[in-house]
Image: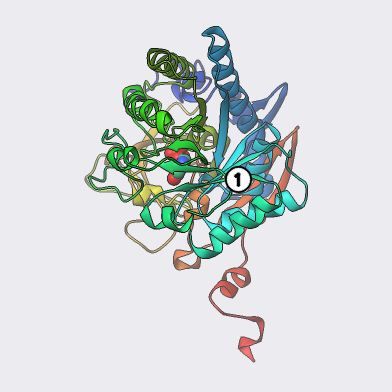
Amino acid sequence: MPKKKKPKKPGKNWKKFWKLGMEEWNTQYFDITKDGELTIREGNYIYNLNDIVKKYGSPTEIVFPFILEERLEDLHDYFQAYMKIQGYRGKFFYHYPLKVNQNKEFVMPLISEGAHMEVGSVNELWIVKKLWEGEKFHSKIRVLCNGPKTEAYIKLIEELRLKDLSIMPIIEDEHELERLAKYKGEVGIRVNLDTKADTHWDKKVDRFGFSSKELLDLPKMKNLKLLHYHIGSQINNAKSVMQPIEEAMGLYVKLVKNHPNLDTLDVGGGFGVPYEKKPFYGAKKVSEQIVKLLKKMSDKARIRHPNLAVEWGRYIVAPAQVTIYSVIAEKPIPKANAKSWYVIDGSFMNDLLDTWAIHQKWHIVPVNNANATTLKSVWLAGSSCDSDDKYTSGGSYVLMPKLKEGEPQYLAIFDSGAYQDALASHHCLLSSPAKLIAQDGTIKVARKRETAEAIGRLFGWTNGDHK
Ligand SMILES: *Cc1c(COP(=O)(O)O)cnc(C)c1O
């Protein structure tokens, strides 16, 4: 949140004021033009977001595949470099958890950048099947299957294994253990750790995975390859990333004695994103700590260094999309931390559901007039008729330019690439935003803004109804 006092020198450092151009906050690609318009840079190409939204309308989401690619490339580089420096003999595998964003425009760039996959349901695995059958995958790609294993899910896993896909179901409970007892391929197993991380996942009782004791009591399993845990999402600090790894590695060291083919530790997802643009931990440092810890613990126990799998979804994809709305009305608020409501032409409840579900805070920047010298403290209201459809930045306020007569005001919500699409809904039958892809200097319309007819169809209103 920018400070309340007004910036002193207009036109001087708007980039800094709006917290752009900062690598540690993933805004290094963004800037403000002399005219106060928000831009993003891909290599030497610059997209002007104000021009784009004027041309394609709002609300709109813009996806930046180059950010996905860069983030994954960097992550590979960190781990591979530290493994090399420290003489680590295990391998690093990045598995993209499909649930974080299943849009094709997100998935394909990650695959091309070398991501393996993690799926959580039979329908997500169906996407993998399509890609596999279409020969869109490198044949060495690895797929991990989490989530409750329905019969249909297990059948599809079997089918793909027989088609030579490298696929591994991860066993989460007794029932799955029994059901998969005769499974011929390799399997993983999920532990429910005692460590609790500082995350949104604040549940005291967790229903996923076995206790450490249950795992240590398992009879020898020749096809057990991987030990997995997933501790939660948006972990708030580095310590909460490291502690579960230490606990899981302690368990791995014991398990490997009984299960001769166990060779991979999969630390799940959860790595956080600095949505609030406050000091935050980063992957460069933490990856070094992880490699060090795994090396130290395996050397001490005199075991082979395990392969390391990570499933950090949000971390990779959140910064690769912005959502843009236009302000359609202003309404004064008599007594509050903010002076006015700015009503937007989209919906927090529909398009950015975590605003409502987990009180997600967002980084919000004007798309035009970002060099305005006087700013207003506002709350944002969505276009649905629901009183919960709002954003107050946790009861504080958002700074925005004053509205100008006859001129639209657009605003961009950063880091909207993770989770929001699959959670999106149609309260009041509002249309979802259009989805644009900005790549190689061109804008492609991936999904148009929905028409009334398209939404009506979802609710059974087909063409013949008026007859
Ligand atoms: C949701 C999930 C992930 C991704 O979590 P992020 O917080 O997005 O990194 C990874 N693995 C499993 C098993 C999950 O359920």
Question: In the rendered image, which quarter is residue 428 located in?
Answer: bottom left
- Asked whether 278 or 406 is in front, the reply is 278
Q: Which residue is mark 1?
A: 167
Tally of marks = 1
- Asked whether 200 or 395 is in front, the reply is 200
The x and y percentages for residue 383 are 44, 58
Q: Residue furthest bottom?
A: 467
The x and y percentages for residue 51 are 67, 38
Q: Amino acid at mark 1?
A: Ile
Question: Along the horizontal axis of the image, is 250 left or right of 283?
Answer: left
Question: In the rendered image, which quarter is residue 455 located in?
Answer: bottom right
The x and y percentages for residue 176 are 43, 55
> What scheme was used to colour the molecule?
rainbow
Taking the image as drawn, is residue 301 in sight? yes
Question: Along the horizontal axis of the image, is 426 left or right of 216?
Answer: right
Question: Along the horizontal axis of the image, is 117 left or right of 22?
Answer: right
Q: Which quadrant would the N terminus be assigned to in this image?
A: top left
Q: Which residue does the image show at 56% across and 51% down from the upper left?
A: 59
- Asked whether 80 or 303 is in front, the reply is 303
The residue at label 1 has a CB less than 8 Å from ligand 1: no
Taking the image as drawn, is residue 345 in sight? no
Q: Which residue does the image show at 63% across and 42% down from the upper left?
A: 106
* Residue 456 against residue 155 in the figure, above or below: below
Q: Which quadrant would the C terminus be assigned to in this image?
A: bottom right
Q: Which residue does the image show at 49% across and 34% down from the upper left?
A: 312
| Mark 1 surroundings within 10 Å by alpha-carbon count, few (fewer than 14), some (14 through 19), many (20 or more) | many
Q: Secondary structure at mark 1?
A: strand
Task: State which image quarter holds ligand 1.
Answer: top left
